[in-house]
Image: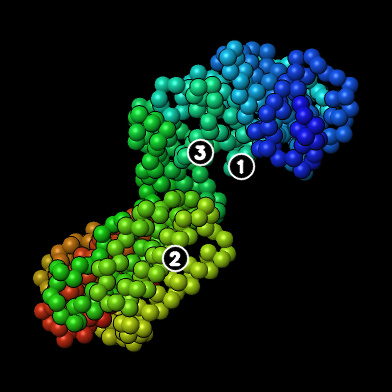
Amino acid sequence: MSNDVYSCLLSDTCSYEELLHTPNFFVKWASLLQGIDKSEQHETDFESFNHPRIFIKYKQPINGYDVTVVCLPYNYTYDKERETEIWGNALLCFEKKDSRFYIYNESFSDSVLYYVNEQEVRDNMILELDYLPKSKNEYLSHNSPFFFSDVDFDGEEELIINNWRCGTRYCNTYDVYKITNNEAKRLIVEPFNKIESHAEFDSINKTIILNCYNGHRESYYKKYKQINKSTSYQFNLITIGQPGTDRKFTTLSDIDMGLKPKDFPDTPLIKELLDLYNSAIILYSLDHDFNLAECFDWNLKEIVNKLDCSIISNDTIREYAQNYKKVILSILSKDTFSDSESTKRIVTTHDTFAKKIIECFHVTDDMCQIYDSVVTGSIVEVEKQIKNNAVKPLIDDIPDFNKKCLYTLGAYYSNYYSTPALAIKPLQELMESKQYSIYICEIWRIWKFISENEVDWLGVPEEEYSAMKIVCLKTILAQIIQHPNDIMAINQFMQLSLMKYI
């Protein structure tokens, strides 16, 4: 071993990644494990090294490999459970007749070294250990320091390196290595770059589920499926959801939720109303998907790139939409996008776009006055009548559609339904009838509110809310097309277009 290599070995600032690629650096340490060539000079050099070294040799070959390890235990005390625990950085040597390779492990240990070892940890300590094998019925071993397992369903076992207590809530994480031509190459593609001990493997359906936590310590899962049998480690993320529920988190940028101008009359009023809605849904979709990417570490660049801003005919608003999309794509291209500067850019660009929509389409608080005075007042009056038993809401027998909508809302507000969830179906049937009512906005809002708060706290998937909103908007547009001076309908369309989005 050269003097330069030894200088690196004895330096506190030495990079383990540099050591890994230093020719023959491991040979001398491996020889110490075998009790040969342990010269006094080397012992003297080692004494100047500030960290103890533990040399480990496993008694049994593992998958045909003789395995030796040099471990440098962590020297901190704040998180130590036992003084005799062995846990630290390590270099592992895998050797058989015609091959040898080395792997660096930043968090090496196992259940024996961590929990069972009773020997005092000292420099130049040499251990000969029985290997802890993985159980045959499991893909990942919690107790083994490394093991072989077919985690990509190609019929060949990969080498799995256990990163002891490096995961969420002190679970283990695992590095996956493909061994080809006597070389070990780590898989750094999803999902293999983020495997933790509670991952679930399904060899029949060729799926892997990762159970995760976001920055708010909320649990969620990611489900991946093999997409390329010839390159078995290529998997696609197919689902993100809430554990124990049917809730799936879905993107919006790749869903067609726009109102296309070609489907409606080419009049200035209709074009302006369509631009209002389309700009609002683009603003919301971009914001929604960026939050998904940030919250669930989800690579959504390709999906966000699908969002079509050209559906906005207004040149100025379209330019603001394209700029917001461009900013989000630039941040999603980074390895991390939660830094303060990126957050500031997103918030600023979002707010600028939203303000431009409000300014361009003359959105004001006065827009709600007609709605509040007519709609809310009527609902309150019917609610009182039902509560006082002055009327019995035989809703199905009411021929007038406007009145049927009013009494359905009044029945909900008056607690006529034994549970609020019972109102969901009647409200949805009113919207799906595609008949216009001055209460259609409130019908959608209450339907969404009940779905979110009474049926399941997770609510209905976002695209279903938007799909029902589009049904209502098209109903209102039909009214406006037939009656261009219907101020109530115009206000309704504007309110529903912006509801929740701005």
What amino acid type is highlighted by mark number 2?
Val
Colour mapping used in the image: rainbow
Q: Which mark is residue 458?
A: none
Estimate how packed mark 3 is, as few (under 14), some (14 to 19) or many (20 or more) residues with alpha carbons within 10 Å: few
Residue 353 locus on image (x, y percent): 40, 74
What amino acid type is highlighted by mark number 1?
Arg
Residue 106 locus on image (x, y percent): 66, 36
Name the quarter where the N terminus is drawn: top right
Q: Which mark is residue 327?
A: 2
Which one is earlier in the sequence, the residue at label 2 or at label 1? 1
- Identified at 37% across, 58% down, the residue is 304
Residue nearest the observer in this picture, 258 or 467: 258
Estimate how packed mark 2 is, as few (under 14), some (14 to 19) or many (20 or more) residues with alpha carbons within 10 Å: some
Q: Which residue is mark 1?
A: 169
Q: Nearer the viewer, mark 1 or mark 3?
A: 3
- Identified at 47% across, 51% down, the residue is 296
Query: Considering only vertical position in the picture, is 386 above or below 93?
Result: below
69 on left or right of 35: left
Residue nearest the observer in this picture, 397 or 132: 132
- Quadrant of the image occupied by residue 305: bottom left
Whether pointer 3 and pointer 2 mark residues with C-beta atoms closer than 8 Å, the reply is no
Estimate how packed mark 1 is, as few (under 14), some (14 to 19) or many (20 or more) residues with alpha carbons within 10 Å: few
Q: Nearer the viewer, mark 2 or mark 1?
A: 2
306 on left or right of 224: left
- Identified at 54% across, 25% down, the residue is 183
What amino acid type is highlighted by mark number 3?
Ile
Alpha carbon of mark 2 to alpha carbon of mark 1: how far? 34 Å
Alpha carbon of mark 3 to alpha carbon of mark 2: how far? 27 Å
- Identified at 37% across, 49% down, the residue is 248
Which one is earlier in the sequence, the residue at label 1 or at label 3? 1
Alpha carbon of mark 1 to alpha carbon of mark 3: how far? 23 Å
